[in-house]
Amino acid sequence: MKAYLSDRINSMSTSATLAMAAKARELRNEGKDIIGLSLGEPDFNIPDFIKEAAKEAIDQNYSSYSPVDGYADLKKAIAHKFQRDNALEYTPAQIVVSTGAKQSLANVAMVLINPGDEVILPAPYWVSYRDIVKLAGGIPVEVSTDISSDFKMTPEQLRNAITPKTKMIWYSSPCNPSGSVYSREELEGLAAVLREHPGIFVVSDEIYEHINFRSEHASIAAIDGMYDRTITVNGVSKAFAMTGWRIGYIGAPEWIARACTKFQGQITSGANAIGQRATIAALEAPVSRIQYMIDEFLQRRDLILKLLSDIQGFRVNVPEGAFYVFPDISSFFGKELRGHTIDNASDFALYLLEEAHVATVTGEAFGNPNCIRISYAASEKEIREAVRRIADAV
């Protein structure tokens, strides 16, 4: 029946994170004790003050279609958040609220990318970037980084990747999957290259902004010459543990925001009404209201780094944000473990699932074939047991 499907869907990859989660569920259903460290989902409950805002919205009968680009008072709250946290001045007309940051990214791709346009993706990159770009007709151009550069692209690499067909660059900071964080100085270096090419736009994915163990978060849109060509993407899934509420948003030049609203109006219309009302409470609260989650993630990061450092063959950098480690496990390639030949990161991730009963994600899905992604959005007990199993398996 595949022949009846569109070329578009046949050429699209299945999300590796969701595929691994599905495989882990299958094994659990067979009675296997699987520890899931594959999904990027906080294991905290939503803060009570956000729940109360949602309950109040239900009582106030927020059940009708919402405006396509979001409630006016939510967009005002987002504009205030951008000013408070990022030194970015966006008007409500420059903001579009969508059904998760993933839809925000898809909107931007569909309104800016023409067939044949090249989009630079510093690798590793989030799994969906590549396929969203391809769906819009764009050509992903991967710029490889590795553990020696803390998985960050240099200005020289960016300059060498630019061609007359380059339309955009997409990156995340803090990064999924590496946890790397670009400093303001590093972004200044990239911006200096981009100022030589005024027709290139930037998608800055800042969904992990608050899960940041550095002293500050830097937004490239706040750097000289970048504001009018940057689309800043954010949402409430990660920092506020609101993954299922599906609220994301952009701040962008008004003409891009209008185009995204036009496109979204034909695809999904406005985002979930109750979720939007709850998001107002989330964004208007000081960041200190969620500091306990950030502190816990930092403790877990330090724990998993300490445990992994004791496993021979694992090379790990120190991620400064998000809740992932991205160890280089290429030393195992070409070896046989318990009858399994390990030729690449996908083999290794599958081996850990089947033999150690620990779900991770292959780095190949993120554009780096030498690594695997391990999420530490799990309890200390689960982290300790998972790493013990991994160490035993290798």
Image: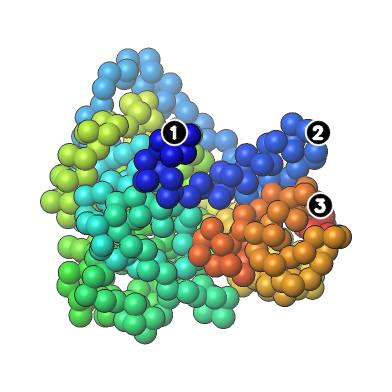
C-alpha separation, residue under disc 2 versus residue under disc 3 = 14 Å
The colour scheme is: rainbow
The amino acid at mark 1 is: Trp
Q: Residue at x 47, y 68 (%)?
A: 123
Q: Residues within 10 Å of mark 2 (few under 14, many from 20)?
A: few
Q: Is residue 46 left or right of residue 229?
A: right
Give the residue at the far bottom of this rendering.
156
In the image, is 92 to the left or to the right of 27? left
- Whichever of callouts 2 and 3 sits on the residue coming sooner in the sequence is 2
Q: Position of residue 188 (x, y in %)?
A: 31, 77
Q: Which residue is mark 1?
A: 245
- For residue 160, above or below residue 363: below
**Amino acid at pointer 3:** Glu
Say if 322 sits above or below 272 in the image.
below
The kind of secondary structure element at disc 3 is helix
How far apart marks 1 and 3 lie (CA) works out to 35 Å
Earlier-in-chain disc, 1 versus 3: 1
Point 39% across, 81% down: residue: 157
Please tell me whether mark 1 sits on a helix, a strand or a loop.
Answer: helix
Residue 194 higher or lower than 91, as above or below: below
Provide the residue designation for mark 2: 31
Secondary-structure class at tag 2: loop
Closer to the camera in the image, 86 or 340:
340
Please report the residue visible at 86 percent of the width from the left and 60 percent of the height from the top.
338
Residue designated by label 3: 355
Q: Is residue 288 visible?
A: no
Q: Tags 1 and 3 in contact by the CB under 8 Å rule?
A: no
Residue that protrudes farthest toward the left in the picture = 255
**Amino acid bearing label 2:** Gly
Residue 135 on image: x %, y %:
34, 50
Q: Badges 2 and 1: C-beta atoms under 8 Å apart?
A: no
